[in-house]
Amino acid sequence: MTQDFGWIHLVPLLNGAWLTIQLCFFSLLIGGAIGIIVGLGAASKNKLANVLSSIYIRLVRGVPLLMIIFLIYFALPMLHIGINFSKGFSAVAALSIYAGAYLGEIVRGGIQSVPKGQFEAADALGMTTFQKFRHVIIPQAMKFIIPPGIGFFIALIKDSSLVSIIGYIDLTKAGKVVSSLTFNPIASFLAVAAVYFVLCFGLSKASYYYEKRFLRST
């Protein structure tokens, strides 16, 4: 039975938005951990770590996110090795791998933006590698990492709409469901676009104030 688009249909859209936020949060958390490791490796003088990290970054950045989602959700089960990921796990895994490569490049760029004199000063003080990065390099690199990192998170929220292709009920998928119920795709997807705008605009404003406070304190 066809329904007229109304306020009641905002409920599934908001539920989808909440699942999108959770998906992006966990993906950014895991992807951030991967990005730190990969970024440190790419900026390292260790040749093996540098090569492996660079390969990961270039390989993942050179493949569309949709292909990564397909490979994890559809291709791995076809190998008949007992792997059959759920939609939610596949979505988080794909976005985490994707985020890890981009955040790794951001971390690498941030570290290499720190003047070489700071590395030399830390070495002259007899700091270990961990102490050097913990107390000298990373605090200075953060001002180069935070702005593009926030920009990437906003882009990740929009890119996460691709997980709807495997049936994960995110905001975009919820919009498709509402569109099917109401036969009103214009109203349905305008509402979806409005929710995405509120999420991204709100995050950008919050990050702007945080960035100002952080950079003022460093």
Image: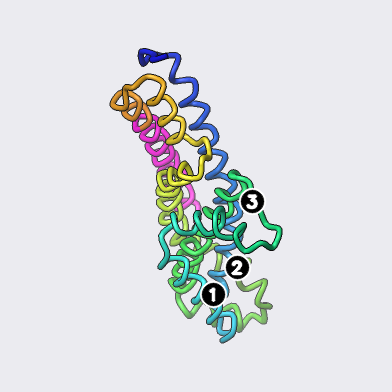
Marking on residue 53? 1
Quadrant for residue 129, please give it: bottom right
**In x, y percent, where is residue 10?**
44, 20
Image coords of residue 48 (percent x, y) = 59, 84
Report the amino acid beneath label 2.
Ile
Closer to the observer: label 2 or label 1?
1
Q: Look at the picture and state if 121 lies above or below 184.
A: below
- Magenta region's main secondary structure? helix
Measure how far apart labels 2 and 1 are at the Cα level.
8 Å
> Is residue 201 magenta-colored?
yes
Residue depicted at 37% across the width and 19% down the height = 182
Q: Is residue 129 left or right of residue 154?
A: right
Q: Amino acid at mark 1?
A: Ser
Q: Secondary structure at mark 1?
A: helix
Q: Please state the extent of the stretch shown in magenta in the rendering.
A: 193-218
Q: Nearer the viewer, mark 1 or mark 3?
A: 3
Q: Secondary structure at mark 3?
A: loop
Find residue 83 and report its horizontal and vertical position in percent. Answer: 68, 57
Q: Which mark is drawn over residue 85? A: 3
Identify the residue at the far left of this view. Answer: 186
Give the residue number, with chain letter if any, for mark 2.
37
Is 23 in the magenta?
A: no
